[in-house]
Amino acid sequence: MNEIVIKQNLAPNVWLMGIYSPQVAKKAKPGQFVILRVTENGERIPLTIADFDNEKGIVYIIFQVVGKTTSLLSQLNPGDRIIDFVGPLGMPYEHSPEDKDYLFIAGGLGIPAIFSKVKMLHSEGKNIDIIIGGRSKENIFFEDELKKYCNNLYISTNDGSYGKKGFVTDILKELLESGRRYDEIFAVGPVPMMKAVVDITKRFSIKTLVSLNPIMVDGTGMCGGCRVKIGNEVKFACVDGPIFNGFEVDFDGLMKRNSYYQDVENISYKEHKCKIGLGE
Ligand SMILES: Cc1cc2nc3c(=O)[nH]c(=O)nc-3n(C[C@H](O)[C@H](O)[C@H](O)COP(=O)(O)OP(=O)(O)OC[C@H]3O[C@@H](n4cnc5c(N)ncnc54)[C@H](O)[C@@H]3O)c2cc1C
Ligand code: FES
């Protein structure tokens, strides 16, 4: 159980892994995530279920190495096991059957959160456009996989080395200003990016969902570590979300909370790097 069966490098520091976990694969729905632990004394980190194969019992994750735990995970190989692999967690992404036109926007590591939903909506015959963006050409991945399931795939890079130069929001603005309309827009990526998307879509009154990434600990609603302000209410992203109506999210509050542990994280990553090769 929890054996890594597939490992693939998608971009610098970005990995796709397939994990044999039939219980999670059987119940998973688009929009949900797992919480995993890599070592006995390790922390629990949330990662989105990027895709799942119910018949083979495989759950796919795509992750970026940003600190200690994701670095340890990236050092595992097919045949290795992940100690804890808990899920599926969170509320699935529900869509209304009447909606026909969808725009998905994935900035940075947003692709895992859109992929399985894009596949599902494509199989239901919906019209799907996708915008993906990254820092430069080498950070763009999954282009061919996404193209199979959408009508138009737009790409932006900050330095202009691939696709349109600029941000995903530049393409969004162009599409909407040219008169293109969608029944629903779903945006996932860094918090400032989601905030910028919502600032634009609000002007056009287009329903916009976002998937939030606050710090999580248990992932089952027991601690409130993941709390976010939605409208006038406090919600726990791990049980009430992680998907919320973008027009109601307090993005500034979320950014502040996400930076609370930055010093500890930097120290922990630095110490871990110093010990690489010592078997710890
Ligand atoms: C619902 C959800 C789904 C996510 N899905 C993905 C995904 O599919 N792919 C992916 O690459 N990343 C995803 N993340 C982010 C991922 O959890 C963090 O990158 C990871 O926890 C970093 O751990 P670390 O020890 O390597 O780095 P650290 O050095 O601990 O942290 C680096 C940064 O990661 C974030 N982070 C750290 N700990 C947590 C935590 N317990 N919960 C949430 N964020 C944390 C913080 O912003 C921090 O500044 C998701 C986060 C959430 C909440
Ligand atoms: S992570 Fe503890 S309540 Fe959400």
Image: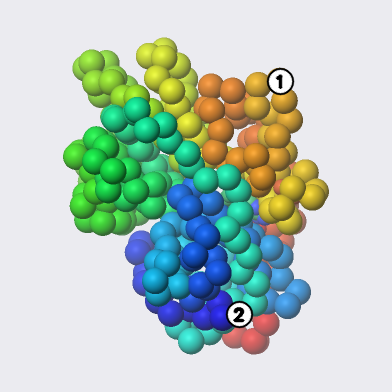
Observer-side mark, 2 or 1, equals 1
Taking the image as shown, residue 143 lies to the left or right of residue 246, namely left
Q: Position of residue 18 (x, y in %)?
A: 43, 71
Looking at the image, which residue is at 41% across and 31% down? 96
Taking the image as shown, residue 97 lies to the left or right of residue 67, namely left
Tell me the CA gap for discs 2 and 1. Answer: 46 Å
Say what amino acid the circle numbered 2 marks: Ile
Looking at the image, which residue is at 65% across and 27% down? 230
Q: Which residue is mark 2?
A: 276
Q: Residues within 10 Å of mark 2 (few under 14, many from 20)?
A: few
Instruction: Locate residue 98: give its quadrant.
Output: top left
Q: Is residue 257 visible?
A: no
Q: Is residue 279 visible?
A: yes
Q: Are marks 2 and 1 in contact (CB under 8 Å)?
A: no
Q: Which residue is mark 1?
A: 232
Q: Position of residue 13 (x, y in %)?
A: 44, 64
Vertical relation: 245 (above or below) 36? above
Instruction: Locate residue 167: give its quadrant.
Output: top left
